Amino acid sequence: MSQTVTIDPVTRIEGHAKITIHLDDAGQVQNARFHVTEFRGFEKFCVGRSFWEMPGITARICGICPVSHLLASAKAGDAILGVQIPERATKLRRLMNWGQLVQSHALSFFHLSAPDLLLGMESDPAKRNVMGLIAAYPEIARNGIRLRQYGQDIIRLLGGRSVHPAWSVPGGVREPLSEENRDAIKRGLPEAFDIVELALNLLKDSFEGFDEEIDSYGDFPSLFMGLVTPEGGLEHYDGMLRIMDSSGRILDQVSPDRYRSVMGEAVEPWSYLKFPYYRPLGYESGAGMYRVGPLARLNICDFAGTPRADRELRQFRRLGDQGKPVLSSFHYHYARLIEILFCLEKIEETIEDPGITGNHVRSRATVNHRIGVGVSEAPRGTLFHEYQVDEHGILQNVNLVIATGQNNMAMNRTVQQIARKYVNGDSLGQGILNRIEHGIRCYDPCLSCSTHAYGQMPLHVQLVAPGGEVLDEVARG
């Protein structure tokens, strides 16, 4: 029988991962596991703090998508206060969230994935990175930098800085949008639209060269989960929580504060990352596996709700089998670009609102409810913050369900699928690291956001015989 590998938390830096590939008696891949070795502990060390502090604290969970935690935390605070925040504050929060989606998706596509797509999956990892992309395709690299900068500028113009802005708070936001900053956001839109259209054409033109990858990089039936508007449209901030199966059938649609009724969390001894699953179908059989993020959001929505994104969404859905959801995780890349297009259209629509620069942006109250749930769509998927407080607003319990974790079962299945496709015999080549790395990157997980941008994702792959002996291993980082 294959050996179970348990990892000590020797490396606590975000980004360290280990893959074990287990062979059966015939030398074929029996199983593969994606081990996450870091431990954070935010849920525990936030207990005893005031819920008012939580947006600023939890934004530090991630430097790439701090806005997601900022908004989910502030929304949990809104629920504890029991207030309806000003409509203008909701629009401004949405505006910042769209800016974050633009910058994070641009980073994922241009800096982290374009080197694979343009330089080749089997290329030298020393060159298969953003610096290699700049050398080979300087204009494409420049476009990625510019598009990401635009999203970060929106965050900065609203919150005062582009990383960890202390701006969204329980009850609304701290500062309104000035007319000067509104005009600056508007000026950047034409270039941003041009860049995402070029990126869409670049990606779609590349599909013919990646038939094998499309079929093996996470191409399997699963459930999909995310937010939709009450009408079923694409949503990133509010709405209903929808769960759909791989045939396109809606299994559940509940209020986000009832997430526990549809979601369970399993643990395994070989990874610090939990394994969320759809509770009615269970964990053990794998039937409860679901995916979140751009691919899921485009699968579950009935429409996008903006002209350009809806046109692109119709093309995207042709990739599904006879109108069914798109299953290949390789198409997360395509979904991200469509979401950028959607966000730019919504940004354009919102800043044209003549009331967007008014001053009433916050409602004030004290503790009215002991439990608050805040949900927002992060770039990587649906994010949940749940806080329980005492009468003074001091946290008694904190539960955070991170988007990356919800893709954990699917990421493990993807690693297994890639291993079965590309591992032959009793040895491993450097190319298997590149391919596994990209298979994981399709999900854009919050693991090694900074290091693998330079093609050096710390990754350790072991090939394990049925008796437990390690036949071969390769490592990087």
Image: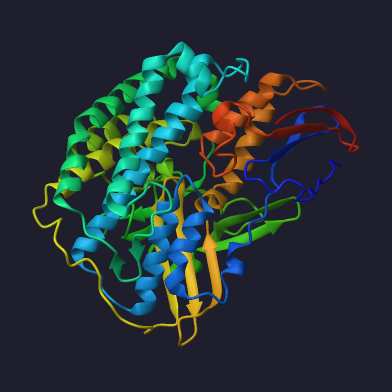
Answer left or right for 93 relative to 205.
left
Name the quadrant containing residue 176: bottom left
Asked if residue 257 can be seen in this view, the reply is no
* Closer-to-camera residue (447/163): 163
Question: Which residue is drawn at the image coordinates 68% and 29% (left, top)?
Answer: 419
Residue 200 at x, y = what percent? 33, 25
Image quarter in which the C terminus is found: top right
Answer left or right for 287 relative to 314.
right
Residue 189 at x, y = what percent? 21, 35
* Closer-to-camera residue (416/134): 134
Question: Which residue is drawn at the image coordinates 83% and 23% (left, top)?
Answer: 426
Question: Which residue is drawn at the image coordinates 60% and 36% (left, top)?
Answer: 414
Compared to residue 172, the image places residue 136 above or below, namely: above
Question: Which residue is drawn at the image coordinates 29% and 76% (left, top)?
Answer: 83
Answer left or right for 446 relative to 363.
right
Residue 425 at x, y = what percent? 80, 20
* Closer-to-camera residue (186/178): 178
Image quarter in which the N terminus is found: top right
Residue 21 at x, y = what percent? 75, 34
Asked if residue 374 can be seen in this view, the reply is yes
